[in-house]
Image (cartoon, rainbow, N blue to C red):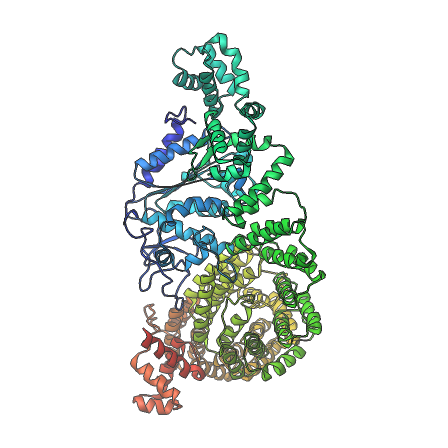
C-alpha cells in the first residue's frame, strides 16, 4: 500500500498474519539450511527401490536409511518409520496453513504481502516469494521457478543431483536447473509430486518457512494447479502459504484457489477500501498536518478509498506543490485521472517518444525487466535507454536499478496493464515480434521467446515455426503438455511449410495425448493425410494414433489402422512391429471377431522369432499372455515369458507402451510364480518413478501389485496397495481404465477379507456396475461384480452376470479359470436353484484348470466343485484341493480349503478336523482374512474346541528346516524321501514345503530359480 511500513486499517489482517506466524514459528528442527549442505537436507539419492513391502511412498530415500520426513502416495507427511504426522505430532508442535487475501486492483495486496515478508523475516522464517505476471501467464512454471530456483541455483550440479536424487531429472527442467533429457517426459502428476517433494523437504529442513504468492490470478496454470493441490498439506508442515489475488480476475485454471479453505477452514480475507479517516491519515502522513478535512475528504471521494490511487494522488499533489486545503480540492479529480487509464497514458506521452517506447518494451517484457533487453526491444541505445528509464522512475511509473545487472519493475501492476493496453495494436504486435528475436539473441532460448511469438500475426515464417516447435519440445519434456500444445497450435496457424505440416501435427498430437485424446486423434489423422516424405515419421504417427485410439476405448479402430498400414509397409521390421501392436490391442478387445484365429497366427509368428530385438520380444511376450488366457499348460506360458525377458524388457521404453511388460509379469503370477511377478513389478514401478510417471502408469502398477499380493494371500498389504492405486486413479480422472482396475481389485480384496458391506459401498461409490468397459480388464469387472452379488445373497442376479461373462469370454478362447474364475462363482450361484447344472459347471472348470496345471488353479476349482457337491465326494474333493494348494503359493485359498475340509470332517473325523481347522485359522490370521478367521473360530467352537489366540507368526524368512526341505525338493526328491532326510513324518515335510511355496512365492516348478535368485540377492547384500 505504501513503500513505508504504515498500513492503514489492516489491523485485522495483520493480526491474522501475526497469529499464523506465531504458530508456524513453533518449530525449530534440524539444521537451518544456511550452512553447508545445499538445501539443508540430507543427501538423498535414489535409495533402495527393491520389492515394495507396503503402501507406496513418494520420493527417494537415501541408501540404507529413510529421510526424516517424507510424503506417501496419498500426499500425507510421515516420519522415517512411516508413521503418519498430522502437524501436532511434529517436534515443537508447528502448525502451518494457508492465508489468503482477496481484493480488487490497487486495494493494497502487494503492500500487505511485503509486510508479511518483513515480519516473517524478522521472526527468523525462510521466505520464498513469487508474483504472477499478466504477460507471463502462458509461461509454464514461471511462478514455481520464482519460488524454488533461488534456493537451488547456487548449488554445484553434482551436489544438487545427490540431494534431489531421482527427482533431479524430473523437476530440474521445469525449474530451469538443467536441460530436459531425451525420452518420454514426466506426466503432470509426477512432476507435481516432484515439486511437492522439493518444497516439503525445504520446509522441513529450513523451518519455519513462509511461501508468499502475489497476484495469484496471473500465475501460470502449471504452477497454480500445483500450489492449489499442495496447499492443504501446509497444515502438516512448518510452512505458511500466503496468497493474494483479485477474485474478479481469477481465471478458470485458478478456481481451486478460490475454493481452498484458509486457516481453521476460514475463507479468504477480503480487503476493503479505506475509510475517509484512513485516507485522511495517509494524506497527512505525506503532505503534513496542514491538509484540512475538506481536502482529505475529497481525496477519499475521488479515489473511492483505493489505497494505490490515494498514495499516487498525494504524490502528485506533493510534486505539483499544491496546497492541501479546501480551495485546491477541486483540482484533485483531474490529478486522480492522471494516475490511471487515459490520464496515465497522457502523462506518459508527455515524457517523449523514446521514453514511451521504452515503457512499452517494459510492459511487453513483464516482471523483472532487464534494462538492456528493454532497450533492445525499444530500439534505443544505452544512453537513451538510461535516460528513458530515469524519466519513468521520476514519473513513478518504473522502479528499480538501471544497470546491466539490475532489474526494473512497474511501480504497480495497474500501471503496467494501462501502458500495455495503451499501445496501438499494430505496434504491440510488431514489438512482440521484435521482443521474441531479442530474447533469442540474448540467449534466453525459444521457450522465453514463444510467449511473444504467440502475440504476432501469422505470416508463413518458417523461422517462427522452428522456434515454436523448439519451445514446444522444451516445455513438453519439462512436463507442461498444455503449454506445448498452445505453441504447436500457433505454429500450425503460421502456417508451416507443406513439407513440415505432418511433423507439426504429429508433435501436436503427442502434446495433446494425455489431456485431449479426442483432439489428438483428429490431429494424427490429419497428419496421415498430409504428404509425408519421411517413412519413419509416418510410422511414428501410426504408432501414436493406434495408441491413443486404444486408450480411448476404440480398440477396434486401433487394430484396423494397423492392419491397413501393415499391408502398405515395405520394411519387414516395421511391419513386424505393427503386427505386434495389432496383436496387443486385439488381446484387449472384448469384441474381437475371431480371437482363436488371431491366437493361431500369433503362435506361428512367435514360434519362429528368436527375440533378437524389442519388437520380437514383444511378440513373444504376447504369445505368453495369449497362452495364459487360453489356458494352455502353464509351463508353455512360462517358457515364452522367459524368452521375452531374455534380452531385456523395460517398462518405460521410448515410444512403447507398458502393457506387454505387465502382461509378461502377470503370466508368472497365474502360473503360480507370484514372487517372480513381484520382482518384475518392483523393477517396473521403479522405472515409472524414475521417469516421473505418477498418474495412470503408477496407478496400474500399484493396483496390479495389489492383485498379486491378493493372490498370494497377503490381504492387508493388498488392500493398502489397491487403495493407493485407486487414489492415483482418482487424480487421473473418473471413468478411466485405471479406475476399473483399481475398484475391481479392491472389491475382490474386501470380499476375501469378509467385509461385504464395505465392498458393496465401494462398488456403489464408483459406479462399478453395468455397462462394463469394452476393453479386457483384469480382474474381469463383470465377474467381480457377480462375485459381489453372490456374497450379498443375490444368487439369481449373480448367476445372470456370471453367465453373461462366460458367454463373452468363452467364444474368444479365454477359458483359463486361473485368469477369470467366472465358472467357480457361477457354480456356487447355480447351486441354489439348479444343483445339477452347478456340478457340471464346476467340473468343467476343474477340467480346464487341470489342463493349465497350476496347483492353485486346480485347488480353487476343486474347492468350488466340493462346494456344489454332496456326500463322500465332497470330502474327497476338498482333500485333493488342499493337496494341490499346499503345493502352491496361494495362502488364502489354502486357508479356505483347510477350513472347509475341517468343517466337513467335524462330525466324522474330529481329530483330523481339528488339525485342519487350526491350520486354517492360523493361515487365515496370517492372510488378514477376518471373515474366514471368524468362520474357523465358529467351527472350532462348534466342535467343542478352544480357538487359539489370534496371532500371525509366519514371515518371509525360511527356517533352516524349510530351506533344507526346499533344496531337497529342487534336487527332485519326493516328499517321502524329504521326510526321511529330515527324520520326520511325510505330513510334516508337506507342510514345510507348503510354507516354502508361500514365502518364496512360487510352486515347485519355479522353486530352483527362486532360491537361486534369493542366494544372489543375499550375496549382493
Would you identify the image quadrant in which residue 82 lies?
A: bottom left
> In the rendered image, is residue 209 in sight?
yes
Pick the quarter of the image with the C terminus: bottom left
Which residue occupies 30% across, 88% down?
A: 982
Instruction: Where is residue 225? Give x, y as percent.
Output: 50, 47
Task: Give whichever of 707, 738 is nearer the camera.
Answer: 738
Decide if residue 79 is on the left or right side of residue 749. Answer: left
Would you identify the image quadrant in which residue 128 lies?
A: top left
Would you identify the image quadrant in which residue 4 lies?
A: top left
Which residue occupies 58% across, 67% down?
A: 777
Q: Is residue 818 above or below residue 311?
A: below
Task: Give whichever of 449, 282 is nearer the camera.
Answer: 449
Decide if residue 642 is on the left or right side of residue 605. Answer: left
Task: Give whichever of 757, 446 is nearer the camera.
Answer: 446
Instruction: Where is residue 714? Give x, y as percent.
Output: 42, 69
Instruction: Where is residue 689? Give x, y as percent.
Output: 45, 62
Decide if residue 640 is on the left or right side of residue 928. Answer: right
Decide if residue 515 is on the left or right side of residue 999. Answer: right
Q: Residue furthest top?
A: 327
How many labels sit on residues? 0
Task: Give whichever of 595, 834 is nearer the camera.
Answer: 595
> In the rendered image, is residue 102 in sight?
no
Instruction: Where is residue 722? Give x, y as percent.
Output: 47, 62
Which residue occupies 54% across, 43% down?
A: 438
Q: Is residue 276 above or below residue 85?
A: above
Pick the quarter of the image with the N terminus: top left
Q: Is residue 795 above or below residue 810?
A: above
Amino acid at each position: 500500500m505504501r513503500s513505508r511500513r504504515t498500513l492503514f486499517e489492516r489491523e485485522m489482517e495483520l493480526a491474522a498474519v501475526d497469529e499464523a506466524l506465531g504458530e508456524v514459528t513453533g518449530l525449530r528442527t534440524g539444521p537451518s539450511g544456511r550452512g553447508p549442505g545445499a538445501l539443508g537436507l540430507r543427501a538423498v539419492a535414489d535409495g533402495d527401490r527393491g520389492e515394495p513391502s507396503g503402501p507406496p511412498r513418494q520420493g527417494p530415500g537415501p541408501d540404507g536409511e529413510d529421510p526424516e520426513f517424507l510424503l506417501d502416495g496419498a500426499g500425507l507427511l510421515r516420519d522415517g518409520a512411516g508413521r503418519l504426522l498430522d502437524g501436532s505430532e511434529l517436534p515443537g508442535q508447528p502448525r502451518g496453513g494457508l492465508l489468503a487475501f482477496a481484493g480488487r486492483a490497487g486495494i493494497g495486496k502487494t503492500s500487505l504481502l511485503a509486510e508479511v515478508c518483513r515480519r516473517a523475516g524478522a521472526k527468523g522464517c525462510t521466505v520464498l516469494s513469487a508474483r504472477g505476471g499478466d504477460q507471463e501467464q502462458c509461461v509454464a512454471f514461471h511462478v514455481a521457478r520464482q519460488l524454488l530456483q533461488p534456493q537451488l541455483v547456487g548449488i554445484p550440479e553434482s551436489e544438487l543431483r545427490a540431494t534431489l536424487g531421482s527427482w533431479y531429472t524430473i523437476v530440474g527442467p521445469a525449474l530451469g536447473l538443467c536441460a530436459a533429457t531425451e525420452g518420454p517426459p514426466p506426466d503432470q502428476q509426477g512432476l507435481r509430486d516432484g515439486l511437492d517433494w522439493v518444497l516439503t523437504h525445504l520446509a522441513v529442513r529450513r523451518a519455519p518457512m513462509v511461501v508468499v504468492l502475489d497476484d495469484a490470478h496471473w500465475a501460470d496454470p502449471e504452477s497454480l494447479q500445483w500450489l492449489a493441490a499442495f496447499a492443504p498439506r501446509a497444515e502438516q508442515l512448518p510452512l505458511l502459504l500466503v496468497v493474494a489475488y483479485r477474485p474478479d480476475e481469477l481465471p478458470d485454471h485458478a478456481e481451486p484457489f478460490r475454493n481452498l479453505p484458509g486457516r481453521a477452514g476460514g475463507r479468504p480475507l477480503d480487503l476493503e477500501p479505506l475509510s475517509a479517516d484512513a485516507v485522511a491519515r495517509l494524506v497527512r502522513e505525506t503532505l503534513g498536518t496542514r491538509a484540512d478535512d475538506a481536502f482529505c475528504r475529497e481525496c477519499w471521494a475521488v479515489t473511492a478509498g483505493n489505497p494505490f490511487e490515494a498514495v499516487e494522488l498525494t504524490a502528485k499533489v506533493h510534486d505539483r506543490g499544491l496546497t492541501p486545503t479546501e480551495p485546491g480540492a477541486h483540482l484533485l479529480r483531474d490529478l486522480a485521472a492522471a494516475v490511471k487509464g487515459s490520464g496515465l497514458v497522457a502523462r506518459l506521452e508527455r515524457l517523449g517518444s523514446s521514453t514511451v517506447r521504452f515503457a512499452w518494451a517494459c510492459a511487453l517484457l513483464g516482471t523483472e525487466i532487464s534494462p538492456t533487453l528493454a532497450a533492445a526491444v525499444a530500439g534505443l541505445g544505452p544512453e537513451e535507454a538510461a535516460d528513458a528509464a530515469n524519466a519513468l522512475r521520476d514519473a513513478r511509473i518504473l522502479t528499480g536499478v538501471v544497470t546491466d545487472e539490475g532489474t526494473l519493475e512497474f511501480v504497480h501492476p495497474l500501471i503496467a496493464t494501462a501502458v500495455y493496453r495503451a499501445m496501438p495494436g499494430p505496434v504491440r504486435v510488431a514489438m512482440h515480434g521484435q521482443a521474441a528475436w531479442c530474447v533469442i539473441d540474448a540467449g534466453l532460448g525459444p521457450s522465453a521467446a514463444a510467449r511473444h511469438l504467440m502475440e504476432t500475426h501469422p505470416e508463413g515464417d518458417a523461422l517462427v515455426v522452428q522456434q515454436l516447435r523448439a519451445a514446444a519440445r522444451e516445455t513438453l519434456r519439462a512436463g507442461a503438455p498444455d503449454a506445448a500444445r498452445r505453441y504447436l497450435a500457433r505454429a500450425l496457424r503460421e502456417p508451416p511449410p507443406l513439407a513440415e505440416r505432418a511433423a507439426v501435427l504429429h508433435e501436436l498430437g503427442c502434446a495433446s495425448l494425455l489431456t485431449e485424446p479426442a483432439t489428438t486423434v483428429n490431429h494424427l489423422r490429419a497428419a496421415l493425410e498430409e504428404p509425408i516424405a519421411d517413412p519413419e515419421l509416418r510410422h511414428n504417427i501410426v504408432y501414436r494414433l493406434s495408441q491413443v485410439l486404444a486408450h480411448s476405448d476404440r480398440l477396434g479402430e486401433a487394430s484396423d489402422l494397423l492392419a491397413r498400414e501393415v499391408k502398405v509397409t515395405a520394411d519387414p521390421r516395421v511391419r513386424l512391429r505393427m503386427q505386434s501392436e495389432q496383436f496387443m490391442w486385439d488381446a484387449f478387445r472384448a469384441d474381437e471377431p475371431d480371437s482363436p484365429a488371431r491366437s493361431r497366427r500369433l503362435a506361428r509368428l512367435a514360434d519362429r522369432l528368436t527375440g533378437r530385438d524389442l519388437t520380437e520380444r514383444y511378440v513373444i511376450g504376447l504369445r505368453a499372455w495369449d497362452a495364459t488366457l487360453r489356458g494352455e499348460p502353464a509351463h508353455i506360458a512360462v517358457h515364452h515369458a522367459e524368452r521375452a525377458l531374455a534380452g531385456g524388457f523395460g517398462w518405460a521404453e521410448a515410444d512403447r507402451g507398458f502393457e506387454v511388460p505387465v502382461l509378461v509379469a502377470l503370466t508368472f503370477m497365474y502360473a503360480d510364480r507370484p514372487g517372480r511377478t513381484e520382482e518384475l513389478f518392483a523393477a517396473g514401478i521403479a522405472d515409472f518413478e524414475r521417469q516421473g510417471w505418477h498418474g495412470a502408469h503408477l496407478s496400474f502398477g500399484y493396483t496390479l501389485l495389489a492383485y498379486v499380493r491378493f493372490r498370494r494371500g497377503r490381504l492387508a498389504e493388498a488392500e493398502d496397495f489397491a487403495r493407493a492405486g485407486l487414489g492415483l486413479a482418482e487424480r487421473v480422472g473418473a471413468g478411466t481404465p485405471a479406475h476399473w482396475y483399481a475398484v475391481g481389485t479392491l472389491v475382490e480384496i474386501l470380499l476375501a477379507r469378509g467385509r461385504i458391506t464395505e465392498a458393496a459401498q465401494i462398488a456403489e461409490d464408483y459406479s462399478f456396475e453395468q455397462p462394463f468397459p469394452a476393453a479386457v480388464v483384469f480382474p474381469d469387472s463383470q465377474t467381480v461384480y457377480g462375485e459381489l452379488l453372490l456374497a450379498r445373497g443375490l444368487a439369481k442376479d449373480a448367476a445372470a452376470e456370471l453367465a453373461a461373462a462366460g458367454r463373452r469370454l468363452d467364444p474368444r478362447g479365454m477359458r483359463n479359470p486361473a485368469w477369470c474364475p467366472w465358472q467357480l462363482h457361477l457354480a456356487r450361484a447355480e447351486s441354489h436353484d439348479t444343483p445339477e447344472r452347478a456340478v457340471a459347471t464346476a467340473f468343467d472348470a476343474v477340467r480346464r484348470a487341470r489342463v493349465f496345471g497350476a496347483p492353485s488353479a486346480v485347488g480353487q476349482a476343486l474347492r468350488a466343485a466340493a462346494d456344489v457337491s454332496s456326500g463322500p465326494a465332497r470330502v474327497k474333493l476338498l482333500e485333493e484341493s488342499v493337496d494341490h494348494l499346499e503345493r502352491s503359493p496361494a495362502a488364502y485359498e489354502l486357508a479356505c480349503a483347510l477350513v472347509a475340509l475341517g468343517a466337513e470332517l467335524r462330525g466324522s473325523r474330529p481329530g483330523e478336523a481339528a488339525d485342519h481347522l487350526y491350520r486354517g485359522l492360523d493361515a487365515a490370521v496370517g492372510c488378514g482374512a477376518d471373515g474366514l478367521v471368524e468362520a474357523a473360530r465358529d467351527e472350532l467352537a462348534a466342535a467343542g474346541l478352544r480357538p487359539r489366540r489370534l496371532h500371525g507368526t509366519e514371515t518371509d524368512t525360511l527356517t533352516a528346516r524349510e530351506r533344507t526341505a526346499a533344496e531337497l525338493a529342487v534336487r527332485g526328491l519326493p516328499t517321502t524321501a524329504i521326510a526321511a532326510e529330515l527324520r520326520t513324518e511325510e505330513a510334516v515335510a508337506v507342510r514345510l514345503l507348503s510354507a516354502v511355496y508361500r514365502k518364496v512365492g512360487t510352486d515347485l516348478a519355479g522353486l530352483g530359480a527362486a532360491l537361486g535368485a534369493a542366494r544372489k540377492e543375499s550375496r549382493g547384500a
